[in-house]
Image (tube, grey):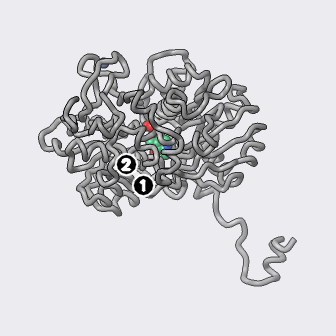
Amino acid sequence: MTSALAPSGIDPATSPARALACRACSARYPLIAQHACYECFGPLEVDHDPTALATVTREQIEAGPRNIWRYAPLLPVGQDPATRVTLDPGFTPLVAAPRLAAEVGLTAPLWVKDDSANPTHSFKDRVVSVALTAARSLGFTRFACASTGNLANSVAAHAARAGAPSVVFIPSDLEQGKVVTTAVYGGDLVAIDGSYDDVNRLCGELVETDEFEDTAFVNVNVRPYYAEGSKTLGYEVAEQLGWRIPAQVVIPMASGELLTKVDKAFAELVEIGLVEAPAGGWRVFGAQSAGCSPIAAALHADSDTINPVKPTGIAKSLNIGDPAAGPYALESVRRTGGWMAAADDDEIRAGIRLLARTAGVFAETAGGVTVAVLRKLVESGRLDPTAETVIFNTGEGLKTLDAVADQAGPSHRIKASLRAARDAGLMG
Ligand SMILES: *Cc1c(COP(=O)(O)O)cnc(C)c1O
Ligand SMILES: [Zn+2]
C-alpha cells in the first residue's frame, strides 16, 4: 500500500481501514468487494489500524457534524464529505425512560436509544450510508440489497438522493408500510415468492453474474463495510452518556450483526482511550422473536451450532432464519456475561404499547421484541435491575401499524356536545 490510493479505491491515507480479515481463520484480504473467505468461507470483517484509530480525540468527534459522520475517522471510508452517499443519519435521541424502568422493575437508569428518528426511520440508514460510500469508492454504480424491509427503504432512498439506479429484493409478504416506503423512491423493487433467506440466496447468486458486476449489494458483496456502520450506534450511546459505556445493553437480532458491532464499538472506544470500561465491564443481551429465534435457541441449548429455522410471526424485520452473524453474537453475549431471550407475538404487541405509553416512543415490532425481552430478562434475574441499561429501538411504529391496529383505536366515540363529553366521563 505505497500508492496514495490503494487498488481497492479506499484510500489508506484518509481511512483507518487496512484490510479485510476472516472472522473464522484470520486470513487477510485487501479492501475490496468481498464478504466470504476463500480459505474457509468464513465472513470477512474490516480490520482497522489501531495506531490510526488512536489519534482520534473526543474534541475532534465533538466538533464534527451531528450525524454518523462525526465518527468518520473510525469508519472504513475516506474523509472527504464530497465522496459520501448518504442521508446523514445518526445522532438520534437517547431517551430517559424512568416510567418504563419502574414498570419492568429496574431501579437503575434506563435509556431508549431511539433510531426510529433516522431519515428512513430505522437504524439501517447507518449501515447503508457507510456501505454505499465505500461502494462508490470501490467503483460501483448501482445499489442493491436483500431486505426484510427497512434495508429496502434505506437503499432506495439513498440511491434516489445520489441519483443512482437501485434494485431492491424483498420477500413478497412484507408489511405495506415497508413496501410503500420503498417503492415511492423509484428504483426497481423486486418481490420474491419466498422467505428472506430465499431472497438472500438469490442475491448471492446474482452478485456473481456479469450483469451485476456494477452492482453493490449492501449486505452481500460489500457486507464488511455495511456491518461497520452499526458501530456508530455504540459510539453515540457512549458519547451521549457523557463518554461512558452503560453496564447493560439489550439489542434486537436479525442476522446478529448489530449486536456484535455495538460490542465492537465499545471495545474500540476503550482500546483507543476515549472512554473507560465500566467497573465489571458491559454485558450484551440479545432479543429475538419466538417465531424466529435460532440464535437464542443455540445459547439456551449451550450449543455453538445455529440451526436454521423457517421464520414465522409479526416481527418481520427480524425474520432471518439463517443468521450470518449468529455465532459471533453468541460469542459476544457469552464473553460479556449477557443472555438472550425471545418474545411471542402477543408479548411483542404488549411491548410496543408499553414503550409508547411509558416513554412516548412508538416502535415497530422489533422494538416491541426488545421491550418484551427486557421485561423477561429482569423477571428471570438475568439482567441486573440495579445496573444502568440501554435498550435499542431500531425502527418506527408507523411502518408496522397492523401489529397494534386492533388494539389502538379511539378510547371514546361521542357526539360533539358538552353533555356527551360529561356523560363519557371526560370532565372529571
Ligand atoms: C435489520 C434490523 C435489525 C438488526 O439487524 P442485524 O441483522 O441483527 O444487524 C434490528 N431491528 C430492525 C428494525 C432492523 O431492521
Ligand atoms: Zn477464513
Q: Position of residue 212 (x, y in %)?
A: 17, 43
Q: Secondary structure at mark 2?
A: helix
* 114 relative to 175 in the view: left or right: right
Q: Residues within 10 Å of mark 2 (few under 14, many from 20)?
A: many
Which amino acid type is marked by label 1? Asp
Residue 123 circle label: none
- Give the residue drawn at x 21%, y 35%: 6
Q: Residues within 10 Å of mark 1 (few under 14, many from 20)?
A: some
Q: Position of residue 186 (x, y in %)?
A: 29, 61
Q: Nearer the viewer, residue 311 or 99?
A: 99
Q: Position of residue 231 (x, y in %)?
A: 47, 38
Q: Secondary structure at mark 1?
A: loop
- Give the residue drawn at x 34%, y 60%: 183
Q: Residue furthest right?
A: 428
- Give the residue drawn at x 54%, y 15%: 302
Residue 88 circle label: 1
Q: Is residue 47 above or below residue 56?
A: above
Q: Tell me the quarter of the image containing the C terminus.
A: bottom right
Tag 2 residue: 129
- Give the residue drawn at x 41%, y 40%: 73
Q: Earlier in the sequence, mark 1 or mark 2?
A: 1
